[in-house]
Image: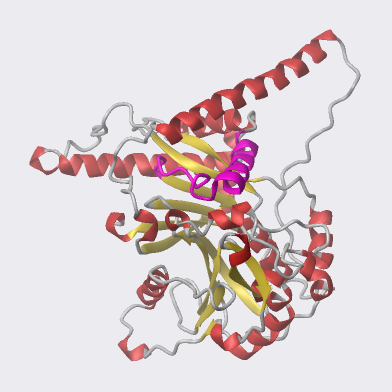
């Protein structure tokens, strides 16, 4: 068995307080952070991490003191400021790790299925909230062997503390490469956009002008569609569409691991992105699921095998989240994980309304082609920036209720890149990473995260819609 050891710091804790904006006593929560406290969007991020060794709780606690507890928002209460209309503010407090680190001891003789025990444990967490009398995070350490890991850690963080990208950055700063225990892991990065040359003939200037005008036109169309959606344009009522109030219901959280090499094979063949392929896979899966559900509802117990039972013109959209942080190369990422001074963490995210194609395609690659076309169109718009600033403006002047997330869409979709190589966290080798959320105003959330040569697809489903 691999021996766990304390994390060797790489100048992480010295400057880690710059990671998050809670650096001054009494600073109010940002508008985006307050948005995640609304009744219909009281959202928690929950990260299930499988380990290839048994967890040593004492080693984990010792490392938390020098990592998480150096993060101001992990050692701050969220307190109502009566002098400012009850607006929440950050207030420093002493952290008692015993209130945050839970180490249950299940009777293994009574556990019929370790996988189901962990799934039920996570589902039960979605029924509860963290008390605001302590910093809003906790960590559950389960030394129980499952089919995918020797032990499981479950980190639960209220979304007001930070978004998925910021928490992934924090997780990476607490991790090291298996191949080099003193080196930080690396993240996959997009290609750096090439700067436009000022030289060129009339045709190049015309193409550049046309591209700019196209972005503004697409943004105008998307903004109008967004406003129409908020006012009255709801998605088609399908077995996937949750009712009002679904944000407060328990969740069933499951995940499946697929080969990253297989995804890259399709990506390269289609000249697409990994996100295009995963959206295409999602469209195919949802189409087949709905076709089967509608087939069961037909008289006689189901439609003919291979035939389409789908209603025509299904409108099914995802609230797809977009990281608004600027491009960072791996050298910059490594440096900021060391010093933390140049990384802006918190909730710097926008979102787009992403239409999914729901149909039975003869050629499965048509789902990827459709996702690629829609993705290309959504990249040529400022919609995520608009939704971010609109939420901030509405939250600031009209209250977070008016800037809440749209409930008219069917699902949430998010894609976060993970480390490119096998890693250890606090000396424990990681088998898989499975982040997701609960508390969102949709019955379904699909999250995709990469780790080494694997991609994990995580579903957070309202229990009433999980069959």
In this figure, what is the number of numbered marks? 0
Boundaries of the magenta span: 383-410
Asked whether residue 155 is drawn in magenta, I would say no
User: What residue sits 78% from the left and 72% below the top?
Assistant: 180
379 relative position to 408: left or right: right
92 relative position to 267: left or right: right
When the figure is inspected, residue 24 is found, relative to residue 417, above or below; the finding is below
Q: Is residue 302 visible?
A: yes
274 relative position to 190: left or right: left
Query: Based on the displayed image, in which of its 4 quarters is residue 113 positioned?
Result: bottom left
Q: Position of residue 401 (x, y in %)?
A: 49, 49
Query: Based on the displayed image, in which of its 4 quarters is residue 233 positioned?
Result: top left
Q: Is residue 356 visible?
A: no
Q: Quadrant of the N terminus?
A: bottom right
When the figure is inspected, residue 329 is found, relative to residue 74, above or below; the finding is above
328 relative position to 46: left or right: right
Q: Position of residue 430 (x, y in %)?
A: 60, 72
Q: Residue furthest front?
A: 83
When the figure is inspected, residue 213 is found, relative to residue 241, above or below; the finding is above
């Amino acid at each position: 068995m691999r021996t766990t050891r304390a994390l060797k710091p790489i100048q992480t804790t010295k400057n880690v307080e710059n990671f998050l904006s809670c650096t001054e006593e009494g600073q109010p929560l940002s508008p985006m952070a307050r948005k995640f406290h609304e009744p219909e969007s009281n959202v928690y991020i929950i990260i299930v991490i499988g380990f290839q060794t048994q967890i040593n709780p004492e080693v984990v606690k010792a490392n938390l003191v020098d990592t998480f507890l150096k993060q101001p928002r992990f050692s701050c209460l969220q307190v109502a400021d009566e002098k400012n209309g009850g607006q929440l503010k950050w207030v420093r407090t002493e952290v008692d790790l015993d209130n945050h680190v839970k180490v249950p001891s299940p009777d293994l003789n009574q556990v019929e299925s370790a996988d189901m025990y962990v799934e039920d444990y996570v589902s039960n967490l979605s029924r509860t909230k963290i008390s605001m009398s302590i910093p809003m995070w906790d960590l559950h350490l389960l030394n129980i062997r499952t089919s995918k890991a020797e032990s499981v850690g479950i980190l639960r963080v209220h979304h007001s503390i930070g978004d998925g990208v910021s928490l992934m950055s924090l997780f990476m700063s607490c991790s090291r490469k298996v191949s080099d225990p003193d080196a930080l892991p690396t993240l996959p990065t997009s290609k750096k956009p090439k700067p436009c040359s000022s030289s060129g003939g009339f045709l190049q200037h015309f193409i550049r002008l046309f591209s700019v005008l196209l972005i503004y036109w697409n943004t105008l169309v998307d903004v109008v569609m967004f406003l129409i959606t908020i006012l009255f344009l709801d998605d088609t009522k399908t077995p996937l569409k949750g009712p009002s109030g679904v944000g407060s219901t328990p969740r069933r959280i499951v995940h499946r691991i697929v080969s990253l090499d297989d995804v890259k094979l399709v990506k390269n063949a289609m000249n697409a992105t990994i996100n295009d392929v995963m959206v295409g896979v999602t469209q195919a899966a949802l189409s087949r699921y709905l076709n089967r559900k509608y087939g069961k509802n037909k008289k006689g117990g189901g439609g003919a095998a291979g035939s389409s039972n789908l209603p025509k013109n299904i409108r099914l959209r995802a609230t797809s989240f977009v990281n608004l942080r600027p491009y960072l190369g791996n050298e910059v990422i490594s440096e900021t994980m060391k010093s933390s001074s140049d990384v802006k963490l918190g909730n710097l995210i926008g979102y787009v309304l992403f239409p999914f194609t729901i149909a039975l395609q003869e050629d499965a690659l048509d789902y990827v082609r459709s996702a690629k076309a829609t993705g290309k169109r959504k990249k040529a718009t400022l919609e995520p920036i608009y939704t971010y600033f609109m939420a901030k403006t509405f939250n600031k002047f009209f209250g977070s209720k008016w800037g809440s997330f749209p409930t008219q869409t069917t699902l949430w979709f998010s894609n976060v890149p993970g480390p490119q190589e096998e890693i250890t966290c606090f000396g424990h080798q990681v088998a898989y990473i499975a982040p997701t959320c609960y508390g969102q105003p949709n019955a379904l959330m699909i999250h995709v995260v990469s780790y080494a040569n694997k991609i994990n697809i995580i579903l957070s489903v309202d229990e009433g819609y999980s069959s």
